[in-house]
Image (cartoon, helix red, strand yellow):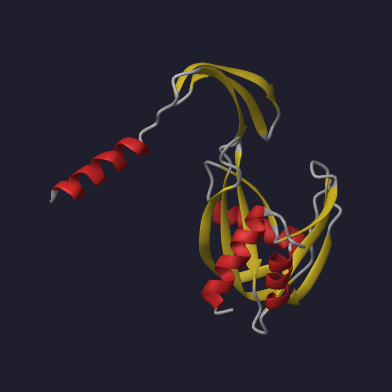
Amino acid sequence: MGCLEFWTAFFFAAMTQNPWKTLQKESIFENPWIRLEKHQIINPAGNPGIYGKVHFKNKAMAIIPIDKEGNTWLVGQYRYTLDEYSWEIPMGGGPIDQDLLDSAKRELKEETGLIAKKWTELLRIHTSNSVTDEEGLVFLAEDLTQGETEFEETEVLQIKKLPFKEALAMVMSGEITDSISIAGILKAARILGY
């Protein structure tokens, strides 16, 4: 290893080490889905401060169903936190200590009525890593059979079947703004050759 390679590796290793120091953690609010934490920290510049963190108790998982004709399904719903209507790929939450594929299968059936025989993990994503530790997993679901939906009592959903290329166009035009949906659709487009 030459001198340049050595110093490059040395500085990269130093940059990837955690420069933050946590002095104290305090739980501010908690419900079955999240815990809001207040952290007393020393930041990378050496200054004290307070950092807020939203800890998710479940992992997000999302599904891109694709049929033999190249169609997919989107779920539309009013998102309270955004105060607007949102088109998204089917998604939900799954316990961190359980198989997320089982959760994805359940969620796809609940929201669209679809059952898939072929499942492929597309990607893992951190949804908003500056304020939350939420991790998401996106699956591609193929070889589909249509069944009945099983909406949760709190859900008022609109289901839309459309050509995958139209869902991709909705991402590119900004009509789909959900981060997991965008990442999943773009990755699926690459894999499927769109």
| Residue found farthest to the bottom | 69
Q: Which residue is drawn at 60% across and 46% down?
A: 127
Give above or below for 35 relative to 90: above
**Residue 135 shows in this picture:** yes
Find residue 27 and report its image quarter.
Answer: top right
Picture quarter with the C terminus:
bottom right
| Residue found farthest to the front | 4
Residue 8, image x, y percentages: 25, 46
**Residue 117 shows in this picture:** no
In the image, 29 versus 84, the foreground residue is 84
Give above or below for 36 relative to 70: above
Give above or below for 84 relative to 143: above
46 left or right of 147 in image: left
Q: Which residue is drawn at 62% across and 66% down?
A: 185
Residue 177, image x, y percentages: 72, 56
Query: For the image shown, how many numbered marks are present on the structure?
Result: 0
Residue 74, image x, y percentages: 75, 65
In the image, 112 versus 42, the foreground residue is 42
Q: Residue at x 51, y 59 (%)?
A: 123
Residue 191, image x, y percentages: 52, 73
97 left or right of 86 in image: left
100 left or right of 16 in image: right
Q: Residue at x 85, y 45 (%)?
A: 83
